[in-house]
Image (spheres, rainbow, N blue to C red):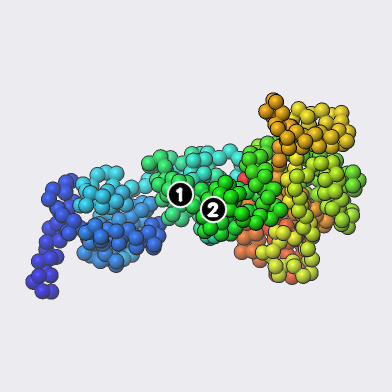
Amino acid sequence: KSSMQKLNVAYNDGMRLLLKMPRWSSASQMFVVLFLLERKMGASRRAFLSQLGRKKGFQVEEVFSERVTHVICENNCSDEVRTWLHSQVGGRTSAQPLDISWFTESMRAGRPVEILDRHKVQQIDEAEVVAFSVPSYACLRRTTLDNHNPVLTDALSLLAENAELSDEDGRGVAFRRAAAVLKALPEPVTGVTQLRGLPCLGGHSLRVIRDILENGASSEVEFTKQSERFKALKVLTDIFGVGAKTAERWIRDGIHSLHQLQESGQTLNRAQQAGLEHYDDLKQPVTKAEADAIGEIVEEAVVSVLPGAQITLIGGFRRGKLTGHDVDFLITHPEEGREVGLMPKVVSWLESQGFLLYQKTTRNSYLEAKDGPARPASNMDRFERCFSIFKLADAEKRGTKQTENTPEDTCRLAAHSQVTDEGPKPASGHRRWRAVRVDLVVSPISQFAFALLGWTGSKLFERELRRWAGHEKAMSLSSHALYDNKQGRYLKATSEEEIFTYLGLEYIPPSERNA
Ligand code: UTP
Ligand code: MN
């Protein structure tokens, strides 16, 4: 080694001693050699922070060596770091593990700040930690509506939504999975150390959680909430019939609000026109009472046009949710084939009674032989399905109708409220009805159990069920069928329980599918 290098080493050694003293005294950042641990932090964040540190004049090493004086970690415990250091240089290092907070505070200060206890990487005493244990597939967990971590799950769901609206589905799913893991915890989380060993919590999600636990809010979440882009995407995609792609296009044309959309002269399709017209109503959550009232109307429609046909409430309300963004029903008939042609009749009945403000029906295009296992991704839209907007009379009016009145009264009622609404509002200022999104799905009885399972949700629960089926069981699950790839055949089922059994899963009732 050159004498200069030797001097350097001696100097660094001396400084290292100095740095271990309680105060930094006159130590300057040039004697601090930092290395950022990638584990948990993630490669891109590590690269970003390393770069930032260098810009602020810190020496940040790309590769670990004996020169390193401090190892900066995020969300690691000291055992983890020690194990890692050992794997690198067999323990021949005196580098001190420090929490990321020390690094960020030092960057802010423009010099290495004093090392306080809170900057030291925590030693975790396994016995003291209230560690949670959660299986990694949501379909192995029982997730009720009793969420003990709403602040954290709301934050992660917002980031998921932002990712989905920005055409970043992978990131969206990652945030949804992280939120779902927290929803399954039996208690509120109070510190990130409790989350060690939990599945589906990547560096990004952990950072958000930690920000909220330590600072009360996540800067990323707050920034997203305030961002013009996110706000515009939300307002526009809240219009029924408008997806992320359309909203994106409009935003590029400078449309950020409903007012701007109306002024823009954009051509709207029929669904979007209805969506815009009933915007305020459709944004209002649907209550369980309203869902039940609609259930009675749909039931009446179904049995009027095909006696013996059955309807089942599906979606969030079947999982026990108290409100929803829409109401979903599954319709079938116990005799295979009798359901054919049912949807148009139901729709005509509802229309003739004045119950529909909008409807669009898609035909059943599912063919087992052609579409079954080969096209698992396309399962979602193959049932005969009706997307509609219902005109639901107010509670008082409904009460009389359901106990005494005939369908003709309901018709009159609906027509009457339409007239008052077109003219000036009644003196009371109250409208007599509201618009509600309703989805109707018709399934042949042979596919009923699969449709019921597939349409009960939650969306993440469904996604995880299909992932489990594919990855762990070599089966393809859709809302129509279950195909066993090894046996090369379809597995018939008449109940959800049977499907869980085929999949080697414990039965999870709807109220515990709120992942
Ligand atoms: P929803 O979007 O209605 O969600 O889909 P939800 O759980 O009822 O919650 P709300 O309405 O926002 O309160 C219900 C179920 O139907 C399935 C989804 O997988 C979800 O589990 N679904 C929905 C489909 O299979 N295909 C679709 O095109 C839409
Ligand atoms: Mn729903």
In the rendered image of this protein, does residue 90 appear above or below residue 307? below
| Residue drawn at 77 percent across, 70 percent down | 370
Q: Which residue is mark 2?
A: 255
Q: Position of residue 236 (x, y in %)?
A: 58, 50
Residue 227 image label? 1
Give the camera-side residue of 60 and 9.
60
**Residue sticking out furthest to the bottom:** 1
**Residue sticking out furthest to the top:** 428
Instruction: Using residue 76 as the reference point, say whether residue 24 is left or right of it.
Output: left
Helix or strand or loop: what does disc 2 sit on? loop
| Residue drawn at 73 percent across, 35 percent down | 423
Q: Is residue 202 visible?
A: yes
Instruction: Using residue 232 as the reference point, say whether residue 499 is left or right of it.
Output: right
The Cα atoms of the two marked residues, 2 and 1, are separated by 15 Å
Callout 2 environment at 10 Å: few (<14), some (14 to 19), or many (20+)? many
Callout 1 environment at 10 Å: few (<14), some (14 to 19), or many (20+)? few
Give the camera-side residue of 418 and 123.
418
Q: Position of residue 197 (x, y in %)?
A: 46, 52
| Residue drawn at 76 percent across, 27 percent down | 396
Label located before the other in sequence (2 or 1): 1
